[in-house]
Image: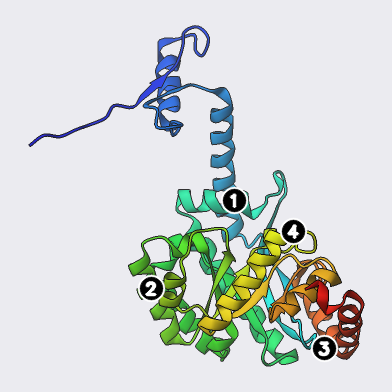
Amino acid sequence: IHLIDKVEIGVANYPLHASTSLQLVQRGLQALAVKPLHGERWHMFNIENVTLSQRRIAIASALKEAIECDQLSLFFQPQIYLNTGKVHGAEALLRWEHPQLGNVPPDLFIPIAESSGIISDLTEWVITQALQYQKKMIVLLPEHIVSINISAKDLLRKDLPVLFITLLNEHQLNPANVMLELTESATLFEGVDIKNALNDYRLIGVKIAIDDFGTGYSSLAYLSKMGFDEIKIDKQFVMNIEYSKNDQTICRATCDIAKSLGSYVVAEGIEDSQSMAKLQSYGCEVGQGYFFSRPLPFDDYMQWLEENLETTTVFVNDLEKVVDLIGKNNY
């Protein structure tokens, strides 16, 4: 049997990186722990990598405490039906304000949670909180949809559907009013297992969305096979849609694809009425973005929801004026 092995090397220099033999070995091991670039088998010690690693460890430790002590919070960004101006629901967004670290963005602490094994506890906290809030939100809007982001690391967990069943029954919620959002990169991971996992959630009655669509490499056959209920257009294609022909083409094509697959489209990052009107002309059903509202703490979102349930007719009239002003020939 012929085995081809590889050797990876961490390099540290005396006296540049360390003054003792013990420190030198430690620095070499720290360099070895960093993933080499461009396929190289060796990596030079870099103090910046050590500082970053120490910060990641500090964040992981603080995050575990934040979950246990309930220091996290959920914000909600409204989603609006573009044709009627009525409220569709809201996406639940995780926020973390640490006393010493300050505002820690999700794109920093979520990967750390995944790599450190904390993501399961974090996901359970988000689901529990989101469904508790959903029970209060449907009092104002019975058909309110709450969208919850799920990590690819958690999607294959067999106990997570059980948690959903337990909480849905406890709060007497309609599972069809709960949307699980999966990033496109997450759904491309181990496609067969992902499909089986999604079927477990569909048996419960929960709906499935593919988030950040267009940033990955999904094929039409793959989308058809997975059968997503909702396709979300990433905000990078929406924010410049008024001026970019390429973004217009991508958004229009996404809406056409969704329609042919029996899914509906949610566009993220809508910041002005012109973008909203253009997306509406493509057949996009739902939008979210700063044009409607920033992400809001729960109490503020409830107040916003109560106010906007009374003002949808005004919104629709304003939308019709925008469409007339722009002119359909510009679409």
Q: Residue at x 47, y 71 (%)?
A: 220
Distance between the Cα atoms at labels 4 and 2?
Answer: 35 Å
Closer to the camera, 64 or 247?
247
Pinpoint residue 52: horizontal percent, then vertical percent. Answer: 58, 34
Residue 168 lies, with reference to residue 247, above or below; the image says below
The first of marks 1 and 4 along the sequence is: 1
Q: Can you say which quadrant of the picture contains the N terminus?
A: top left
Tell me the SS state at disc 2: helix
The first of marks 1 and 2 along the sequence is: 1
Badges 4 and 2: C-beta atoms under 8 Å apart? no
Distance between the Cα atoms at labels 2 and 3?
Answer: 37 Å
Q: Amino acid at mark 2?
A: Lys
- Which residue position holds label 2? 195
- Which residue position holds label 4? 244
- Which residue position holds label 3? 309
- Near mark 2 (Cα within 10 A), the count class, few <14, some 14-19 or many ≥20, is some
Q: How many marks?
A: 4
